[in-house]
Amino acid sequence: MADPYLRLDQLEVTFTGGRSPVRAVNGVDLTVDSGETVALIGESGSGKSVTLRAILRLNPEKKTRIGGKVTVGGRDVMGLGNKALAQFRGGEVAMIFQEPLLALDPVYTLGDQITEAIRRHEPISKADARKRALSLFERVRIPSPERRLDTYPHEMSGGMRQRAMIALALACNPKVLLADEPTTALDATVQIQILLLLRELQREFGLSIIFVTHDLGAAVEVADRIAVMYAGRIVEEGSARDIIHTPRHPYTIGLLKSRAHGAMTKGRRLDAIAGSPPDLADLPKGCAFAARCTLATDPCRQTQPELIQTETGTRARCLRTDQTLTRPGELVGA
Amino acid sequence: MSRQPLLQVRGLKKHFPLERKLFGGAGKTVHAVDGVDFDVLEGETLGVVGESGCGKSTTARLLMHLIDPTIGTIVFDGAPVENTRLSLRNYRRRVQMVFQDSYSSLNPRLTIEASIAFGPEVHGTPKKEALARTHDLLERVGLEPARFAERYPHELSGGQRQRVNIARALALQPKVIILDEAVSALDKSVEAQVLNLLLDLKEEFGLTYVFISHDLNVVQFVSDRVMVMYLGKIAELGRSETVFGNARHPYSTALLSSMPSIDPDNRTQHVPLAGDPPNPIDPPAGCRFHTRCAHAETVCSLTEPPLAQVEPDHQAACHMGVAGSGHSRAPEARTAAAAE
């Protein structure tokens, strides 16, 4: 079997800037094959965005301690020199963000930003780079692309800006696209357009995508596999189908149950997960979810559970999976 | 069934003038809310949904009288709400609001007990009594007074701060609470806790909610009736089951099918609605939705459809639901049928 295109081994990210070190990512193992889409799901503070940024080494180096290995296309990302890193960013792995207005430069037109990016990576004339920018705009279906190339980010609507940022990310033909909540700030009718566009581009360019979101629905729309993060660890991982139909980690189950979804009877109380996520500067010794888990026992609080393969397809970091079997699809009202 | 509505909104409009051009050109206007009529019944939860720019938050601020309407009236409990100090002071005791940003809506220099007790004290409750009520409310929203009363907003998590905002809204014993995206900024597991709390409080204090959100799942879960807004107008208004089960306005239908599927074997295949919502500065003529509507015909770009009754307790502003409107899908006009 071929090696996965992108591989994280025991990735650890600790922020050392504050009074006490904050352990944002605590040993994440993740693989993404060529042409595969993996969704990283979690709440704020679960470490999903930090993991994504670590792949591009975007976390501030002076205030961050990184452990573990990041391998992309057979190369060790942590060992890249400045020049190789600049080529790697955008050329090999590109990223799109939640808020395009903050990610795009306000004082240059979109056309200028895209041609600049292309010319930084390849020896190509300005005219040719612009031609490529135009075809990218057509590809992400921006109406009247020729005219839009000469507009500034603030002149576009939110959906159009997000399309422009996707065009910019794809400008240098990356193999991997990292998407950090790209649809969270968008309206419902626009969000689904962008999700379907990403799915289409993924197929066409054979991209590997890591899609970070807190929304299970958005993840299901784009992802082949889903990894659920909690307190800096992947607590459950499996195919999108298995995660939705037969989740085994109590946190994943809790997330599915607490959704205010149409299948619920109106007026009934939601099955909320009690409590709140742990303090990342003071993580418990055992399972980080134990304090909120109704199934937790003493061993859960004492030892860090390993990721185990369950018989229903997912891999879960839980000692009590013998208690978490549900009827397939039960939690989503299927 | 004919309860008197607690709030009656008629012909409500809010236009924001944009800055005038330097050389005296006519200024443009944002038609944020452009003529809406609706009632809020006592004890119900009215959900308001729509995309950015549809006017849902402006409607909330108008309801609260935080901004003056350009034109239109709001009648509360039979009496018009007017911009005189005394009447507004009274009104705001009965109608309270919770905002989306839990941090910026609390005074950072007041402890949370001082924030909650502030309203009752301004309205003349003795300090001791106000504090006692505050501690009682903190308990009710799930924050132990001994641990939390003397903390400052920055010492709390987002979910805890939103509980404080809810307690503060309850401190004046209001009848109506306007919740403007009150759970939107919370993480999913916390959102469920706060939604449960809102349901419990509603029952305990006999409250009426106006629940504004862009999240259709949440609106469907909490609402008795739902109002769908598009570009400053009401597109559809009806009982929650009816709107979610049998939407009659093409915009509502598109909005509902834009909800991501949670079924990996049955993912969304087609984009339900192309394009972005148009700018409320220059709303399209006729039906405001005709530029994005799959069923648009000539009549739609010429005349504006009225918000018409399509069945009992269900109104939609679409020519396809109005007999004799000139749309090919409209039901045949009564008179024509009678002449047969």
Image (tube, coloured by chain):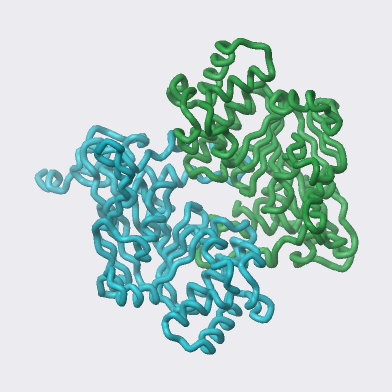
Residue B281 x/y as whole percent: 33, 41
In this rendered view, identify the residue nearer to me: A331 or B209: B209
**In the picture provided, is B306 more to the left or to the right than A17?**
left
- At which x and y percent is residue A175? 71, 25
Q: Which hue is chain A drawn in?
A: green
Q: Is residue B5 above or below residue B235?
A: below
Residue pictured at 31% horizontal, 37% vertical: B290
Quadrant where the N terminus of chain B is found in the figure: bottom left
Picture coordinates of residue B176 (x, y %)? 40, 71
* Residue B251 falls left or right of residue A105: left
Quarter of the picture containing the C terminus of chain B is top left
Can residue B280 be seen?
Answer: yes
Residue lying farthest to the front in this orientation: B23
For this view, does B128 lie left or right of residue B32?
Answer: right
Q: Is residue B3 visible?
A: no
Q: Position of residue A149 (x, y in %)?
A: 49, 23
Query: Is B290 placed above or below B244 here?
Result: above
Q: Residue at x 53, y 69 (%)?
A: B165
**Nearest to the observer: residue B134 or residue B188:** B134
Q: Which chain does cyan denote in the image?
A: B
How many marks the image carries: the answer is 0
Residue at coordinates 51% horizontally, 74% vertically from top-left? B168
Q: Quadrant of residue B80?
A: bottom left
Q: Relative to A90, say whether A255 is above or below.
A: below
For residue A155, which quarter of the picture? top left
Q: Nearer the viewer, residue A240 or A13?
A: A13
